[in-house]
Amino acid sequence: MATKVVTKWTGGLSFDSLVTGHHVILDASEEGGGHDTGVRPKALMLTSIAGCSGMDVVSILGKMKVKDYSFEIEVEGDSTTEHPIVYHTITVIYKFSGKDLPPDKILRAVTLSNDTYCGATAMLRKAAKIVVKIYINDEEVKQ
């Protein structure tokens, strides 16, 4: 199955990318010569990990009957200093909050996403070290 993205230059360093029927505006920072009207392309890779893995985790936890929680993912890319500037390490932090959350099920859902299901993580793991951290109610879950 192929995925097609059409990206059109809209002037300066700005582009409008049509992705599965949705527009994503890309631009450089003002310091980088752009007008800061959209996201940076490389940062979208971090968003891809968060979205892909987040959807996995929510789906898996639903099948495990885990309910009544809030959830967010922080993804941070640490870059090299020489060109091409790439992420050498990507840290993915899963933050859950709620009452009586089962650490074993959350750990299992995150592990399944990262090791089996999330294609974005699998692709980027070939280029960068991926570090995963899990927190439940601000306490780190040991893996």
Image (cartoon, grey):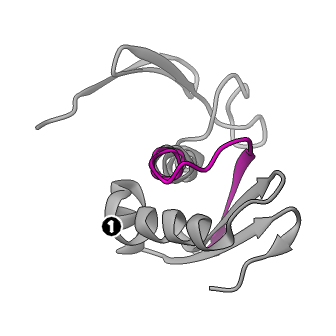
Of 135 and 32, nearer the camera is 135
| Label 1 CA crowd tier, 10 Å (few <14, some 14–19, many 20+) | few
SS category of the residue bearing label 1: helix
The quadrant of the image that shows the N terminus is top left
Number of numbered labels in the structure image: 1
**Is residue 13 positioned above or below 45 on the image?**
above
Of the 4 image quadrants, the one containing the C terminus is: bottom right
Q: Which residues are magenta?
A: 56-80
What's the residue at 52%, 43% (across, down)? 51
Q: Is residue 90 above or below residue 48?
A: below
Determine if residue 83 is in view: no
What kind of residue is marked 1? Thr
Q: Is residue 128 above or below residue 95?
A: below
Is residue 66 located in the magenta-colored stretch of the structure? yes
Q: Is residue 8 left or right of residue 31?
A: left
Task: Give the residue drawn at x 41%, y 67%.
Answer: 112
Query: Who is closer to the viewer here, 5 or 121?
Result: 121
* Residue position marked by numbered label 1 in the rendering: 116
Question: Residue 52's spot in the image, x, y percent?
Answer: 45, 47
Name the residue: 77% across, 68% down.
135
- 119 or 102: nearer the eye? 102
Is 68 or 34 nearer to us in this picture?
A: 68
Residue 132 image point, x, y percent: 61, 74
Residue 9 vertical position relative to residue 102 in the rendered view, above or below:
above
For residue 97: magenta?
Answer: no
